[in-house]
Image (cartoon, helix red, strand yellow):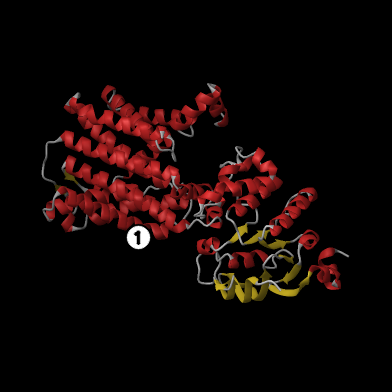
Amino acid sequence: MNETVLSIRKLTAGYGGAPVLFDVDLEVRAGEIVALVGSNGAGKTTLLRAVSRVLRAEGGIAFNGEDILPLPPEKVFSRGLVQVPEGRQLFGAMTVEENLRMGAFRRTDKRTLKESFEHVYGLFPILEERRRGLAGNLSGGEQQMCAMGRALMAEPKLLLIDEMSLGLAPVIVDQLLDVLTDIRSRGVTVLLVEQDVFAAFSVADRGYVMETGRITREGPVSELGDDPAVREAYLGA
Amino acid sequence: MIRLAIILVGAAILACLPFFTGAVFMQFAINALILAVLTQSWNIIGGFTGYVSFGNSTFYGLGIYGTAVAMVKFSLPFAVGLGCGAVLAVLAALLIGIPILRLRGPYFAIATLGLAAATGALVSTIDLAGANTGLVLPLVRADTMFYELALGLLLVCTLTVLWIATSRFGAGLVAIREDEDAAATMGVNTTAYKVIALMMSAFFTAIAGGIYAYWISFIDPSSAFDPTLNVRMVIMAVFGGPGTVLGPLAGSFILSAVYEVLSSWISTAAALLFGIVIVLAVIFTPRGIADVLVGVRRHGWRYLTRNIRENRL
């Protein structure tokens, strides 16, 4: 069994006085792609916000064995826990290249920057073609690629991807899923948060199902995919 | 590198100017240089970080009063006075910045708008600061010295802005301007960056205030905490090109000259004509003079017609 990269224990979080997450337990091991699925409002994004320390939370979050609960967001980021936010959050008035450069904002080793650019452009050739174009003028799929490329520029150890497939054509989603496998083979662990259960389970090793702030099921995706309850609720079969 | 050369050569030429011009021109030039410093300082928080501050006249006033009180009431030398004013303004920026830099867009602008008025009112109740009547500083007739001081300050301020434009710090500020949430996601400590930007802005603004105080030698709350001065900083920076290194300089020099010429021709209608100039500038050069220079070189006159179309005229 590989070592644990991210370990969440009894995590509780919420907005104002309203709790959203209740005693969430979740574990991601090195080299895995883990899918977190659930319907709208289940608390998936809230969990990511708590993990990246943007949102106050109680319980335990350990990253590579270190308790990151007391750390500010930028410290967590520097440890290699990088998020691809929902809605991409690109810098629309900046070029693709400038966006990618922003990904490397907290990197101190500038020498390997060129390598990272080549790596990202290798994964997404379209970004290299458009590197002088404004990120705001990219298509939805290209924007998602740019957001993922920007996150990769930070040399993440664990990549948190929020709703990667949102509003994208199935062909594009397939392409992006292939890239995830590629990224994993380079030693980046991925936690994929998705509503599109089909897409998520097609690349993930293990999955968690979240409902109204609680993890209700977990296991290898092959088992989850066969689970009648999951099939009924999410796969429409 | 080109920008650095332009700045250094420009400063060298300006430094020689007092030896060829008269007293009237010196008056105008010192005013213009101080305004340029204010505009360039505003550029740090307003242009690069995208936080439209109307609170910079507060820092200006604190710089003026810090220097004046230190010199008049405590008989300290001018340099120490400048330091007092700067420390006062930077501390104010820190204390005020932490709460109000949480506000965004118009909310931030409104919050800062009240600052100058409030601080002015506060100062006019403090006896140590001369209350309502103001303070009279020791009179020095040395326009050339004040000119060179203001020019030196403008040089340091502009070099700082040049550093910002090319540094990681500046990249963080621009990221905040473009999308603050995205900047935070990419690991920019947004709160610290914004507060530091405001403190830098306050520092240069306050030093300019100190030089002004000693030069003009009489100060009172209403002239030190003048909100219309802040409006001029914004107009000049926006006219020149906010978020650029040389734009705010061009903007402030051009508008200072335009205003001077207008008011010597027709004193009463000068403000009106000044307004018209600004309206025209916003229509034809909505992104500032700096953008026009690049745009016209790249697209020719089409650049200007496109601006007019985009403004739906």
Q: Position of residue B219 (x, y in %)?
A: 19, 45
In this orientation, which residue lies closer to the viewer: B70 or A73? A73
The single residue placed furthest to the right in the displayed view is: A237
As helix, strand or loop, the secondary structure at mark 1 comes to: helix
Relative image position of residue A221 (x, y in whole percent): 79, 68
Locate the N terminus of chain B by quadrant.
top left
Q: Is residue B115 left or right of residue A30?
A: left
Residue B121 visible at all:
no
**Residue denoted by label 1:** B95
Q: Is residue A148 left or right of residue B190?
A: right
**Side of B140 relative to B109 (left or right):** left
Q: Residue at x 51, y 53 (%)?
A: A109
For residue B111, above or below residue A126: below
Residue A13's spot in the image, x, y percent? Answer: 59, 72
Asked if residue B69 lies left or right of residue A106, the reply is left
Rendered location of residue B259, percent (x, y): 32, 29
Q: Residues within 10 Å of mark 1 (few under 14, many from 20)?
A: few
Q: Residue at point 84% right, 72% down? A: A227
Amino acid at circle 1: Leu
